[in-house]
Image (tube, helix red, strand yellow):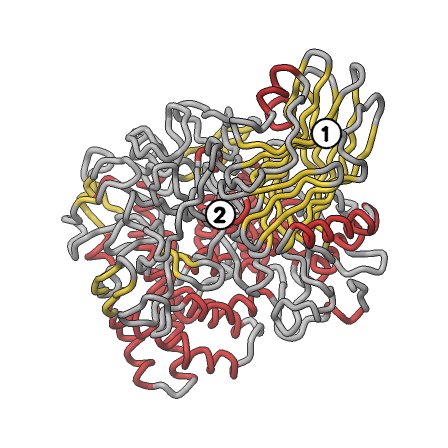
Amino acid sequence: MRHRTISQFTPKSGLSHLSLALSLGLILSGPAHCLPVNHNPTLNAGGDATDGPAKPSAWSNSAKQGIGASYEAYDHLRYANTSKTGTVSKVWFSLAQGIVTETMYGRIDQAQIRELQLVITGPDYTAFEARDTISHVDYIDKDEAGRPLSPAYRLTNTDKAGRFVIIKDIFTDPDHQSLMMRVTIKPLKGPVTAYVLLDPSMANTSGNDQGVTSDKALSAFEGHVALSLMASTPFVKTNIGFTGVSDGISELDSTHNLTLEQDSTQGTAGNIVMLGQLPKISHETTIDFALGFGSNVKLAANEASATLKSGYKTVLNRFNGGHGYMGWEDYVNSLSELKSLIPYSEDNGKLLYASAITLKVQEDRTHAGAMIASLSNPWGDSVFTKQSSTGYKAVWPRDFYQVSMALAAVGDHETPVAAFRYLPTVQVTAHTIGNKGDGGWFLQKSHIDGTPEWVGVQLDQTAMPILLGWQLQKHGFITEAELKAAYKTSLKPAADFLSMGGTVDIGWNHTKIVPPYSQQERWEEQEGYSPSTTAAVISGLEAASDLAMRFDDKTGASLYSAKANEYSQKLEPRLYTTQGMVSGKPQSYYLRISKTQDANSPGVEAERNGQSPLASDLMMDAGFIELVRYGIRRADDPHITSSIAAIDNQSLSDDLRVRYDLTLDGHSYPGFRRYGHDGYGDTTQGQNYGSMSPDQRGRVWPIFTGERGHYELALAGLKSGGATKADIDHIRDTYVKAIEVFANEGLMIPEQVFDGIGSEGIHTYSLGKGTDSATPLAWSHAEYIKLLRSLRDRQIWDQNSVAFAHFAAQ
């Protein structure tokens, strides 16, 4: 079904955070966003799942070594079994600590397992992969320069005591609803016995699961979803039990043997774990596993069986492409701008290729264009979910815009268009579930089917869909006719809301919005006027005014232009303080946010993430750089340059400090926190996020290194003759290289990296490497790609040229 022809990848047209519920039910926020309980409640929460007689389980480590899914071709920009790749596989997986974690099936936001790992026993020891091995990850399919061509991974897990090595190849079957895992076990100090440990979390919760086992399969089910794990060799012994009570793990760990044998949960639902014993291994042995999914156990077993029957080589070839099959290599080869960006990387394009693949993986395969923020649950190994929780596996229009523009930057001619066509799904209208107020704005956070999850109003997320449509038409991705239709039905209502605001009445949210005062700024934590939000709003309105003129809406064109001018004229009075005291003496810089119209009397920011209220002038961020990014102010504007100087002050206290130059491998790399006094992160005492205590600390975000690189490019571009090769090389050596250093071995870019302040955490963080926040973060990968494209073009890739011409070109 996946055979290809030469013409099948010819472009059709053109050029080419969040959140989690913790054990006490705290609803927190996401890519860079966090609120205490009740500020971001889910609109429609379901009932609690029961753990039954078991103890509850948290999700797995969110510092992913890799993520994957099959490549599926569109059929008229939709996913269907009639596409050129045939049956649509709807299975995703992630890897952390050397094991498979959080495998999704059906929808990208629905996890079905917590973890899948091997346990190795010898005469006097029991070793768990995640606990007792040192893991390394690599890509199976790479080009001659080592650039990844597909998200098929090889994990090499070496026992810390030198007793064995486990090599695992992991990928999905693109023609079936299953995950394939080839396992090679190498005993180094005598025979071993291997067990496969499968921890289901069916229907995206830890409880309510039931299961059965046999020598052929380990199977679990809840409601209308089931899984079945099969191996190429029969299991010698199996057990299914309730976590922490009868799961066999404690016995296996203490006695190095499994005597418990139970083949069914016998009608009792709860939090279960399954074990399957494999034959004793005396020499290097390879065993294939397939984890199948379906609406019942029989169908899940059929999927797994079909994968094993196809065999490792065939399934891998179908996954990768080549050998007459259509797969990931075809997608990579279709990216018309990808190769041209390699010279602007510092690692010869490795992270570039991985980033393009990573972004495409994080798209749902039912709702084409629905791209999530991250295939992870931040601080997952301390997050308990009695209710189905999306974590970052949800749609934020802000992150969505960044990803769409990044894929456009590498020459993906289809996904950004599918994304643009998807956007009305998450726009508030009279038909939105629970809406009794005005429409036009875009939801804060949504399930991938458009169901509202969080319903706060963030004006930048309403501006960005306008900017996306404008950019896609400018670059030839969509026609003028399609943009005109979208303007009338979707973009004009958004521009009207940005101009006149409206009454919001949905779920918990009952308020009046008067732009550019936003109920939430881009970090979803504070209300007020914000430089970053205002930048997006002005740019969006300028784009809308341009569209209105082109589509004979003179009233709209006049309104949008007038509002953009008004917001720009009031920007500095509202947001540029001349009496900021962050350094202990009066200083001039842009505020992060203000609750008043007077920048010298901006008010006090509310308590968030366990951090005490603080005067607004003491809480700096670099969001003002977005004024340059969106074309609202020149890079050499004195208000901008004085704010850069304030942000770059590394002598501030660690609480208020934003910039950290991290010394890694003898080189210094610039890193930036979201803002001073940020508590969205692990604690300085080494515990995961969630305590809502003063020692929580937001760390350095790779995103901001990319944003600063864009600013430096804009500044260099103002020189006579524009940015020079020396300027480009400096940005590459400083900002591009920094992001590449921040990525992990699997080329996943984290949400946050450790800044060296306080404890290294329960996972022993390394300076400049990811914490247990979301990894990979789609926005991080998108910012990296866009920086490379901007360097190639010698101008900011996603800058709004009409806004720049109006406000910054003078």
Tag 2 secondary structure: helix
Classify residue 437 by image quadrant. Answer: bottom left
Distance between the alpha carbons at the discs numbered 1 and 2: 52 Å
Q: Would residue 385 be seen by someone viewing this image from the given angle?
A: yes
Residue designated by label 1: 237
Where is residue 542, by image quadrant? bottom left
Q: Quadrant of residue 76?
A: bottom right
Disc on res. 706: 2
Q: Looking at the image, do the residues carrying marks 1 and 2 touch, with CB atoms under 8 Å apart?
A: no
- Mark 2: which amino acid? Gly
**Residue 630, position as x, y percentages in the image:** 40, 61
**Would you place residue 153 above or below residue 502 in this image?**
above
Q: Residues within 10 Å of mark 2 (few under 14, many from 20)?
A: many
Residue displayed at 41% across by 25% down: 686
Q: Neighbour class for label 1 at 10 Å: few (<14), some, many (≥20)? A: many
The mark closer to the camera, 1 or 2, is 1
Q: Percent x, y for residue 190?
A: 80, 15
Q: Earlier in the sequence, mark 1 or mark 2?
A: 1
The x and y percentages for residue 791 are 56, 54
Q: Is residue 787 above or below residue 267?
A: below
| Residue found at the very far top of the displayed protein | 124
| Count of marks, rendered view | 2
**Circle 1 sits in a helix, a strand or a loop, which is it?**
strand
